[in-house]
Image: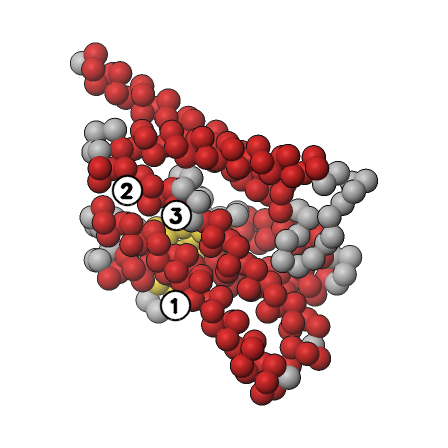
Amino acid sequence: MEPSPSPFDLRWRMFGVGVRVHPTFWLFSLLMGWQYMQQSPWLVLIWVAATFLSILVHELGHVIAGRIFGSPGNIVLYSFGGLAIGSYQYARTWQRIIISLAGPAAGFALYGLVLALDKFVFHQVFHIARFNEYFSNAIRFLLFMNLFWNLLNLIPVFPLDGGQVLRDVCFLFNRRRGEKIAVGMSFVIGGLIALYAVMVMIRNRPENPPEQHLYWPNLYPLFVAILFGMLAVQNLQMYREIEYRQNQWRDD
C-alpha cells in the first residue's frame, strides 16, 4: 500500500517517471546502516546512498517493463523498499510476470555493471578502489545490495516480486483458487524463513558472535526474521479474507 504523502517528501521526475521518497525510507536506511557508525559516520551515509541507488534502479526496472506493456507507472520509496505504482494496471497475467521479474533483473544488471567497472576500470585503469577506503566500501555495498537483496526479492512470498510471480503463475493454472494457493504457500514459506532466521540468531548468541563484515552484517538475521515474520502474518490474514469472501459467495 502506498504511504500517505507528507510535507517532507522529496519529489522529482526522471526519464518521464515521477519519483517520491517518503521520509521513512531515509529512517529505515539509517537504521540498517547504523551498525557502521562506530567505524565512521561517512560509512553510514555511503550505505544510505547505496541503498537509495539500488532500490531506485530496481523500481525503475518495474516501471520501464510496465511502460512497454502500456502501463505507465511512478515510483515511491518508503520504509524497507519501494513501489512501482501503476506499472501493473493494464498488463495481462503473463505480462505481470515479466514486470515483476524486471525489477530484480535491473538490480542484477547494476550488480554486473558495478562489478565490471570495479574490475576493469577502477582497479586496472585508475587504481581508485585500492587507495580509497570509502570508495571501496561503496563498491562492496552496491555489490552486496544488488545481489543479495534481489535474490531475497525473488523468494516466492507475497508481496515480494517472487510472490507476485507465484500468484500470477497459480492464477494461470487455476483461476478460481490460484490466489488462495499462492497466499497459503507464501504464509508457509515466509514462516519457515522467519523461523530459520530466529534459529540463526540463537546460534550466534553474543558470547559467540559471528565475524562482522560488509557482505553479511550481523543485523541481517534480525532483519530477515522481522521481514518474513511480518509477511507471514500478512499472508495469513489475506488467506482468511479470501476464505471469508468465498464462504460469503457460497452462502449467496
Please name the residue shown 47% across and 32% down the image: 232
Q: CA distance from mark 1 to mark 2?
A: 30 Å
Instruction: Report the amino acid beneath label 1.
Output: Met
Q: Residue furthest bottom?
A: 125
- Say what secondary structure mark 2 lies in: helix
On the rendered image, what quadrant is the N terminus found in? top left
Compare residues 173 and 64 and report the one nearer the observer: 173
| Residue bearing mark 1 | 14
The location of residue 122, given as percent across then percent down, is 58, 81
Instruction: Please identify the quarter of the rendering in which residue 98 is found.
Output: bottom left
| Residue bearing mark 3 | 161
Badge number at residue 168: 2
Q: CA distance from mark 3 to mark 2?
A: 11 Å
Closer to viewer: mark 1 or mark 2: 2
The location of residue 150, given as percent across then percent down, is 47, 54
Mark 3 or mark 2: which comes first in sequence? 3
Instruction: Report the amino acid beneath label 2.
Output: Asp
